[in-house]
Image (cartoon, rainbow, N blue to C red):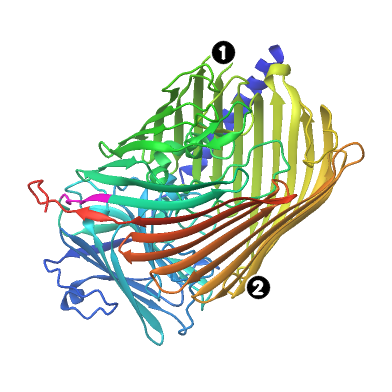
Amino acid sequence: MPKIKQVYSTLRTHYYLLLLTFILISFSNVYSQKKISVKYVASNEFVIDGVLDEAMWDTAIVSSEFTEYFPTDSKLVEYQTEIRMLYNDAFLYIGIKAHSPGMDYQTPSYERDFSISGADVINLMFDTFSDRTNAFLFGINPYRVQREGLISNGGTSGNLDLSWDTKWLGESTIDEFFTTSEIRIPMSAFKYKEGVTQWKFNAMRSNTQSNTKSSWAPVPLSQNQLNLGYFGTMTFEKPLVKSKSPISIIPYITPSYSKDYLNDERSFDFKTGFDVKIPIKSSYMLDLTLNPDFSSEDVVAGQNNVTRFEIKQDETRQFFIDNGDLFNEFGLPDDALAFYSRRVGVGSNTDGNDISVPISAGIKFTGKVNKGLRIGVLDVQTSGDKDEFIPKNNNLVLAAQQKIFSKSNISFFFINREVTNPNDKYSGTRYNRVAGTDLKFFSKNNSFDAQVFFHKSFTENIESNSISTGTYLNLEKRKYTLRFTGQYIDNGFQSDLGYIRRKDIVRANPFFEYNIYPKTNALNTIILKISNNLFWMPSDDMRFVGSDLLLASTFNFTSGASVALTGAERYEYLDEPFNPGSGDGEPLPIGGYNYRDLKVDFNTNKRNAFWLEGNIKYGSFYTGTKSTTDITFQYRVQPIFFVSLNVQYDDINLPEPYSSNNLWYIGPTLNFTFTKTLFWNTDIQYSTQTDSFFVVSRVQWRYAPLSDIYLTYSGVNTTNPHILVERGLFLKATYWLDIKRKKNGTFF
């Protein structure tokens, strides 16, 4: 115990010294002062055609002088962008003129919410509460392809969710040396307070022909371009009135056929359900889902896993993504999340295997009580699985976030997973609850941020040692980055709806990065990094159980290509036997292991039709060696077709009697975008680690705004031996119905 107290006291002292240093440095940060005025226009007689020929546009105030973000951040960009805005009670109108050296514009596809890597685009971002925490994003490219999303957590790490959907119009035209875009966004698409006259705003543009990225309000190259701390101000001529957002009802039907070849069983099924979105005033949203169907959601990419720990995957289900930052960001995102929404709809059977279970219904209420207080309620009921002895569960999350200082916040949450049909035959505990608080500090322009959190779990039959706490400090300047992560997790801490990578640890992770800006045309930046991730086990008298010492250098070229070299010195203590090769040999015994490896990361210019990115790593591995190759290739025929191929290969060589193995993961994706409304996507996943071959092929027809018909084929095989397991065919139809409200609250 004295040793634990000594280590804790040392860590606490270093933490306070680091926090004080970072806060003092961060005081030098100031907001951008760039401004744009938005004139009021009574008329809605705009023809949205990408031609700014209406007389109303002559009254708009033009704002330009975009600053280059890449390859440099110290001058006005050569090919400028002009923005003008008008508004009234119903719509926000935006006119854009973007100059270019020619007409060779790039777009990966015609599909909405396209990737902007190597593509031309202009993104418009609106912080409607001026709190520099969340923002709406609307983007358009020269081919009239639209994208919209939500920026969260200040945008410091590029927190952009493109799954958010709303109805708006945008058209573009291409001329010899410029493109023109005309946009109309309903005021009901935004959330804001009635009577305000200012929003925070920024715009960013990618110009592939000049190989530049630029921003309306300047953003340093060392910061993410989505960073809300650098937004300027847009001022409305008159105070904004409350918008009357429609109630949206999205019903679906899904007839399907599937065959289980192992049991020789055929199944015909017919599912129906709906989602409802009910705006309440201008700041709240009530989401309801009944019997949701996720057959049309994106396929989550697979990968080899030769570690002892679970790999965290992204959420793809729309219901959990909208305003998900209010629920999903308690703790550390890669190590200790109190709530991880992908857990909802998954249960463990009596063998400890994860099984998907249906979601019966869900409700979500989110919004801002005032300028400082944000609240959220998420409640989802799952059906369970009698054959797998998985009970029904109610999954509840309550969250509140209060703004403090200029743009920091303190949050509180309560999570409750509870069985609703208890039975002694069912697996797992009857309940699991987690409560806690997170304090997040952001400097004015987000160049410094800090987090401190304290979480406690309450689980049946676990009465003590149930704490998860930690801190994160991050200072980003033009020439350097300083970062420190500290963490403590009890062995008894349990969050059934969370993501806890490892328990029973004390962790300290200092990190330093130094940026060099060569004065050459070819090389943009050189980045030098050093990091040491250290672990102790508190339940065993603070025994040292792991470290990852990394030294890295990255060379970023002005073409967009990069190459990096990383050397690692590692130590890992196995507290139980482990078989990293997943073979038939004996597992590695309990004990400590030292090993080293060298890794090369690379990517080519993504503006080209063919590009690749990936890494190659080789080194010692426990008692043997391991070489890893992980490369993604992509080729596109603009804008109709692209093919992407991810290949992962792990060659594990351990001495007898331990398992050596060659692990392959091959994941091709083929995407056809025939028009802006007709798409065909096929994902294939082959894995020798899981002995599986998986195919999902889906045709999507967007027959009306935000309304789709999907035809999906899925197939599963084993690979060793090759056995046909299951085939399925799903036809899903959705329709987005908006019910408008009159000013008196009635519908029409």
Residue pointed to by mark 1:
464
Q: Is residue 283 visible?
A: yes
Q: Is residue 243 magenta?
A: yes
Q: Secondary structure at mark 2?
A: loop
Which residue position holds label 2? 522
Give the residue type that dot 2 points to.
Ala
Say whether residue 415 is left or right of residue 645: left
At label 1, counting other C-alpha atoms closer than 10 Å, the crowd grade (few under 14, some 14-19, many 20 or more) is some
Quick check: 512 left or right of 64?
A: right
Chain-order first, disc 2 or disc 1: 1
What amino acid is found at the position of numbered circle 1 in the picture?
Ser
Query: What secondary structure characterizes most of the magenta part?
Result: loop
Q: Position of residue 284 (x, y in %)?
A: 26, 41
Viewer-nearest of labels 2 and 1? 1
Q: Which residues are magenta?
A: 242-249
In terms of secondary structure, where does tag 1 sit? loop
- Going 85% across and 40% down the picture, which residue do you hit? 659
**Where's residue 311, x and y in %?**
62, 42
Q: Residues within 10 Å of mark 2 (few under 14, many from 20)?
A: few
Residue 688's mark? none
Which residue is pictured at 75% across the width and 49% down the height? Answer: 720
Q: Residue 428 location in percent, x, y?
A: 55, 22
Q: Residue at x 47, y 36 (%)?
A: 344
